[in-house]
Image (cartoon, helix red, strand yellow):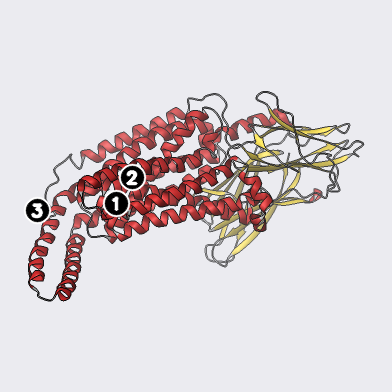
Amino acid sequence: MSATAPYAGPSPIRRPLAAAALLAALVSLVFGLLLAGAGPASAHAALTGSDPADGAVVDTAPKEVTLSFSEAIAVGDDSIRVLDPSGKRADTDTEPKDLSEGSTVRYGVALHSGLPDGTYTVAWQAISADSHPISGAFTFSIGAPSDTTVALPSQEAGGGPVGVVYDIARYAAYGGFVLLVGGSAFVLVCWRGGATALPMQRLVVRGWLTLTAATLVMLLLRNPYTGSGKFADAFDLAGLQSVLDTKPGAALVSRLLLLGAAALFIAVLFGTYARREDEREKKDLTFGLAVGGGVVATGIAATWAMSEHASTGIQANIAMPVDVLHLLAVAAWLGGLASLLVALYRTPDIGSAAVRRFSAVAFGSVVVLAATGIYQSWRQVGSWSALTGTRYGQLLILKVALITVLLAVAWFSRRWTGRLTDSAAASEEASEEEPASDSESVSADPDPERAAQLARQRAALTATKKKRIRDADPQRSGLRRSVLAEAAVAVVLLAVTTMLTSTEPGRTEEEAAAGTPSASAPAAGGPVNLKMPFDTGGQNGKGTVRIDIEPGRTGSNDLHVWIDGSDGKPMDVPELKLALTLESKDIGPLPVVPDRLAEGHWSASAVQIPMAGDWKIDVTVRTSDIDQVTIDKNAKIG
């Protein structure tokens, strides 16, 4: 049958319309449920209050300093430090005292008696229940504010070069898991012949190697990531032992043990299973591999669920299995997509039946993703304001948009798959005609060695012809392009998903922000609006920077930056950086790296202003590889 044969299935016009309607309903349901609200939830812990409060001026020296958090945290020596105006320790305890009562999480340190008047700095660092390091600093004054030589930490916990490498390893771990689990599932469920295909074997093995290497890196860097931020501490045996005693450390070690079982699974899948010819025996082995592989894959997915957002907050007993299902569905869909891409480009043998089976698996995975994603979104966001006003919510919107694009491209792939059904059969028949005649001529050759050589040559020639026939099929070429587009979107989607795992959930951020004013009583202030022209000296290097800081007081602030070109239209630039300095108190510069939201618009949330005063705001704008300028302006904050 020709490649242009009519497609026997739902109308190609009705199918995209039906898909669009279903997609719109799913998106509406997601964001509708986000508004439902629920009891308090938390994931990243957040500082909700302190005594003395941030920026407070007290008449007499307090006996202790206490900090309240939105959820349980892990603390160690020097997790809370109180420094006097000269930078010396003013607290007497190296390990904070647990003052928690009921649902209130509070830690404190005692202060030396007879402290003199002046401004004191409180610096704290801890690990939230979802394994992420958190830190911060604030000031209070005894008697009256004074100058202080203490420079507040410019690097957040989990930041710096160690944080960058750790985040890369986290992303690589997700990618390796997707290739390992999704590739194996693709071979067992969709294309059993792929067990003998070298490109498929390489894909799955590389997924295993990536996940194993990334897990080892995360285990070694866990101590400096949550502590000193120095690479040298990765090989501190005492620090490594302390990591093994934590929930994240136990999860990483469990993952390594499960990867040992996964290595055995891979050996059987591409060894014994690939060589098995008896169909009945192969069917039994398929069932055994599916069950064993499913158990191992579920266990590996659980190592994330037991140490990330799902393990803390409301309904953790429900959230953890839901998170496991979500991860497995992601792996089946995206890993299968990567496998299909490799098979279409690197092997000549995959037929339309395997593509159709993957289409069914992908549809089931999307259904599971929609159900589990709705629950996770409700649990971590919970309101419209958190959805649109927090970094977590904005990343979630981006993730939903990427899934929408991915589903749209997938529908085109599905249509190409339907057309591939008829054309693939014709190409298979054409490619199977020659081997029979080849075998007859080979058997007639009296020299066995020469016969074997001719057989190999003719087999290679047959495979080449078969590949050429299939590559010439326009339906197969269309499917290749469509799947390649899906894979490109999937890579970005995986990166955004990884960012979500290390971002404070919107519900927690809103609760912390709501609790801070009453607990900390920050100094009164108002929104700050600045407008600064710039000229980098290069082509199209002129424009205007507009900055809004809200609420414009001590404590947490939201910062928005807009850049307009000389024509007044939004202008994108390759790099934008800010720094805040309070020169009168020798504080700063405190770096701020905003995230790009849209063309000409950047934003940073939870920007900490530790003290009221006349702050200098430096803005660095780079418009090309060599054209850059730094401008500054002072603003009264607090």
Task: Point out residue 22 in the picture as x, y percentages from the top left corner.
Answer: 31, 34
Nearer the viewer's eye, disc 1 or disc 3? Answer: 1
Label 2 neighbour load within 10 Å: few <14, some 14-19, many 20+ = many
Residue where numbered disc 2 is placed: 289
- What residue do we see at 26% from left, 60% from top? 347
- What residue do we see at 54% from left, 64% from top? 624
Numbered tag placed on residue 561 in the rendering: none
Separation (CA) of disc 3 from disc 2: 37 Å
Q: Nearer the viewer, residue 147 or 569?
A: 147
Residue where numbered disc 1 is placed: 273
Amino acid type at mark 2: Leu
Separation (CA) of disc 1 from disc 3: 34 Å
Amino acid type at mark 1: Tyr
Judge left or right: residue 478 versus residue 436: right
Label 3 neighbour load within 10 Å: few <14, some 14-19, many 20+ = few
Quadrant assignment for the C terminus: top right
Q: Nearer the viewer, residue 483 or 338?
A: 338
Residue where numbered disc 3 is placed: 1
Q: Is residue 385 above or below residue 341?
A: above
- What residue do we see at 55% from left, 49% from top? 595
Nearer the viewer's eye, disc 3 or disc 2? Answer: 2
Q: Earlier in the sequence, mark 1 or mark 2?
A: 1
- What residue do we see at 45% from left, 41% from top? 299
